[in-house]
Image (cartoon, grey):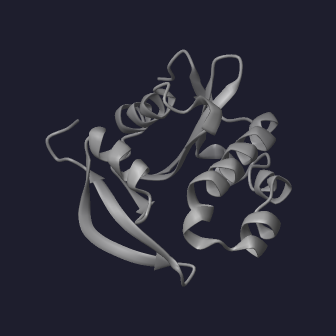
Amino acid sequence: MLTDNIRSAEERDASRIAEMIVANYRVNFYQFFRNDPFYFGELNVLDTAAEYKEGSEALSETYVYDDGVVRGMIRVSGEEIVKLYVEPMFQGRHIGAELLRFAVTELKARWLWALEYNERGIAFYKRSGFEPTGEKMIEDEWVPLIKLRLRADLP
């Protein structure tokens, strides 16, 4: 069941989803990696939007928070939360919490990987009932991630 403001993503949302992903990567992660060729070249709205074309797995797994403006997105594959981003200008308005609650209650999402350096994001997930499992991995040979899982005592 979708909430009033959360709906399945549609192809027309692809550029907006891509804008949020690119903006969040730059605002939240550039400070740790300072990789200009990636953050201001390889990472771009056009290529990211192409991942969300009609019929794509990415599009079918994505939901958006839309109250007249698409302000946030969440992608869930099975029990994994793959991506959760809110437009930086709209953060702090409980949009991320609503998307996360939707993923847990409606889609039965139970775990995710978070950038180890992302203290703000990890704190958000902890407040929302997730806890680090102790499991870690390196993505793309240089990105340290930690796994968080929904506490067993939560639905």
Residue 18 vs residue 88, the one in the foreground = 88
Which residue is painted at 82% across and 59% down in the image? 47
Q: Which residue, as the protein is rendered here, is positioned at the far right?
A: 46
Q: Residue at position x 51%, y 28% from top?
A: 95
Extreme residue toward the left, this view: 153
Q: Could you say which quadrant of the image residue 33 lies in?
A: bottom right
In the image, is 14 to the left or to the right of 117? Answer: right
Q: How far across and how far down the image is residue 132, in percent?
A: 26, 59
38, 109: nearer the viewer: 38
**Quadrant (top left, top right, bottom left, bottom right) of the C terminus:** top left
Residue 12 higher or lower than 81, as above or below:
above
Q: Hey, which residue is sitting farthest bottom in the picture?
A: 141
Residue 19 versus residue 57 in the image, above or below = above
Q: Is residue 87 visible?
A: no
How many tags in the picture? 0
Residue 136 coordinates in the image, percent (x, y): 34, 74
130 with respect to 45 (left or right): left
Q: Position of residue 99 (x, y in %)?
A: 48, 33
The answer to whether residue 25 is seen in the rendering is: yes
Q: Along the line of sight, which residue is nearer the eye, 61 or 65?
A: 65
User: Nearest the camera: 62 or 42?
Assistant: 42
- The residue at 80%/42% (across/down) is 15
Q: Give how far across and how far down residue 112 sits, in percent.
A: 40, 56
